[in-house]
Amino acid sequence: MTLILGIETSCDETSAAVVEDGRVVHSNVVASQIDIHRRYGGVFPEVASRQHVLSISPVIEQAMADAGMEWGALAAVAVTYGPGLAGSLLVGVNAAKGLAFGLGLPLVGVNHIEAHIYGNWLAQESEPEFPLVCLVVSGGHSELILMAGHGQYRCLGGTLDDAAGEAFDKVGRLLGLPYPGGPSIQQAARNGSPAAFKLPRAWLPGSYDFSFSGVKTAVLHAVRKYQPDLDKAPVGNPQTPLLVRDLPVANLAASFQAAVVEVLVDKACRAAEEYRARTLLLAGGVAANESLREELRRQSPVSVRIPALEYCTDNAAMVACAGYYRLLAGQQAGWDLDVVPSQALTAIGR
Ligand code: KG4
Ligand code: ZN
């Protein structure tokens, strides 16, 4: 039995988890800063790192207490070192270094996108079969990754502009919905019609890349029809929901969500077919979207894996799991492990 303590502080969640053999989650504590950042309508990096400093020790202690584990039971400490916000990553990496050094344990550095992918190994009866294609959609990333085996990543496509979650967040602000936009749009869309507005889909034929700026601008134009002097209004002030009178928020939310989901699902399914994947995985914060989950399950030509909701948005259990497979491959980090705020997943492949 290999117990790994995972630590995640790449953005606005301080999280620590204890996971056995990359699968069995003994604890997964997540201290979210969403309530703090909501007043700014997005993550305020300096505030985020200060908050991580306050939360990191209590969160780690809580993860050990929830798991009912002694420090001596741990086999390694795994931590996210990039991509993410530099000041936030530094807090987790230094906490992990201190603990690993003090306890005489191996330190394992984990890429954040890799961790999201490994969320699909958690609390599952069996492992996903390779080769697999994974659609990673979060606040910072939209990527289609081909994996031939553990730690082997090939990027088939990525976003040319906004990440999928970023587009949800920006459109949420345009519609006067609270941050983060993803869950707010999903909620609003339940009462709307996806066919109400004809929004563009960037198919980018022959490519597995994505682009969401066109659909975002189309929503902006639609909102302007209801409030022509929108530029003068305090758009997206999260404390002033529903700024634009008579704005059909539910229909716009449903139409936007449908446009994004349609392209994501179509490209993921085509990639799975072209690369003869045995499994199609979904990962990242946007993987929590109910419409995306449903459509991917409905349309995939191969078997689909989607993490439980708690392992979609940022959490440390997924970091511990990715760290487990890195440890098995002998990929221990040195004490000089530094944060890499813009690290690409393909830069760490083996
Ligand atoms: O993975 P994550 O927690 O952080 C990053 O690594 O970026 O993803 C956060 C993103 C946010 O943009 C948020 O709006 C989006 O995931 N998100 C959703 C949903 N829940 C979270 N997007 C669409 N539908 C959701 N239900
Ligand atoms: Zn993330």
Image (cartoon, grey):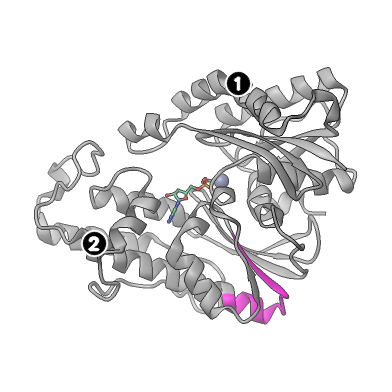
Q: In the rendered structure, which disc, 2 or 1, sits on the residue that comes first in sequence?
A: 1
Q: Which residue is mark 2?
A: 250
Horizontal side, residue 231 vs residue 261: left or right:
left
Q: Amino acid at mark 1?
A: Pro
Q: Residue at x 67, y 43 (%)?
A: 317
Query: Is 293 located above or below residue 284 in the figure?
Result: below
Q: Are marks 2 and 1 in contact (CB under 8 Å)?
A: no
Q: Residue at x 78, y 69 (%)?
A: 130
Q: Nearer the viewer, mark 2 or mark 1?
A: 1
x, y percent for residue 138: 51, 52
Q: Which quadrant: the N terminus? A: top right
x, y percent for residue 70: 79, 25
Dot 2 falls on a residue whose secondary structure is: helix
Q: Residue at x 69, y 52 (%)?
A: 122
Specify whether residue 265 is painted magenta.
no
x, y percent for residue 264: 49, 69
Query: Which segment did they paint magenta?
Result: 269-282
